[in-house]
Image (tube, coloured by chain):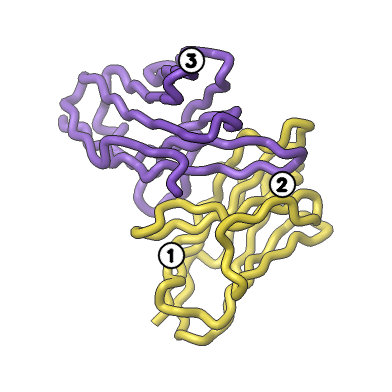
Amino acid sequence: DSGVTQTPKHLITATGQRVTLRCSPRSGDLSVYWYQQSLDQGLQFLIQYYNGEERAKGNILERFSAQQFPDLHSELNLSSLELGDSALYFCASSPRGTSGGTEQFFGPGTRLTVL
Amino acid sequence: QQQVKQSPQSLIVQKGGISIINCAYENTAFDYFPWYQQFPGKGPALLIAIRPDVSEKKEGRFTISFNKSAKQFSLHIMDSQPGDSATYFCAASKSSGSARQLTFGSGTQLTVLP
């Protein structure tokens, strides 16, 4: 158990809908990262937040957005869902440090199925 | 553009054998190279990591070999066990202040036969 929690574990929805995935980082970790894992694209970085502020952005679609709240939990919002958005979504967190979050600890993931 | 190339895609090893997975990177700004292990239905778990100022790092049965000039690194699993059967991902990252993201290889599905 990495100490990172994600809810829900599974999510089934229809095309065009909007969903919110939630992540609670390990106690004391300031950075939260979101990754998408799909069969065709592998594990891809989406976005990073550090202490409430966006720090890095990867291949995140404009239909997707995220935020980190004062209690450091994070939410990933996916809207206008398409079949191709079906994937595993992982959250990771890393300890504070001046060199950035080298060690990233992953949660169990949320499996999103878009029908 | 795939920045971290991983091979092989799948690997079958007998119990007690050595499993070797290779990765190559392109971006010389990468300064941290972790390996992750993922079991079905679970999130990736950090296994071992290395920085480019070190050529080898060993933790138990797991060893990373790093060749900075060739921009390659590999994971060696000694005395492979059926419990090691999982998907292994190499990754690389670089820092920009407090910003850091992992770029993953495509993964290697390891099967260790009893």
Q: Residue A57 in the image: x percent, y percent?
A: 65, 55
Label 1 neighbourhood size at 10 Å, few (<14), some (14-19), many (20+)? many
Q: Nearer the viewer, residue B63 or B3?
A: B3
Kind of residue sitting beneath label 1: Ala
Q: Is residue B86 above or below residue B1?
A: above
Residue A20 visible in this rendered orientation of the protein: no
Residue at position x 43%, y 35% in the image:
B90
What's the distance in space between the residues labelled 2 and 3, CA to CA?
26 Å
Relative to A29, residue A19 above or below: below
Foreground pick, A13 / B24: B24
The percent position of residue B102, horizontal first and vertical second, equals 56, 42
The residue at which mark 1 appears reads as A87
Q: Which mark is residue B90?
A: none
Tag 2, which chain?
A
Q: Label 3 amino acid?
A: Lys
Q: Secondary structure at mark 1?
A: strand
Q: Chain of mark 3?
A: B
Which one of the lettered chains is coloured purple? B
Question: Residue at 71% of width from left, 43% of height from top?
Answer: B99
The mark found on residue A31 in the picture is 2
What percent of the width, then of the height, locates residue A55?
A: 74, 51
Residue at (68% x, 51% y) in the render: A56
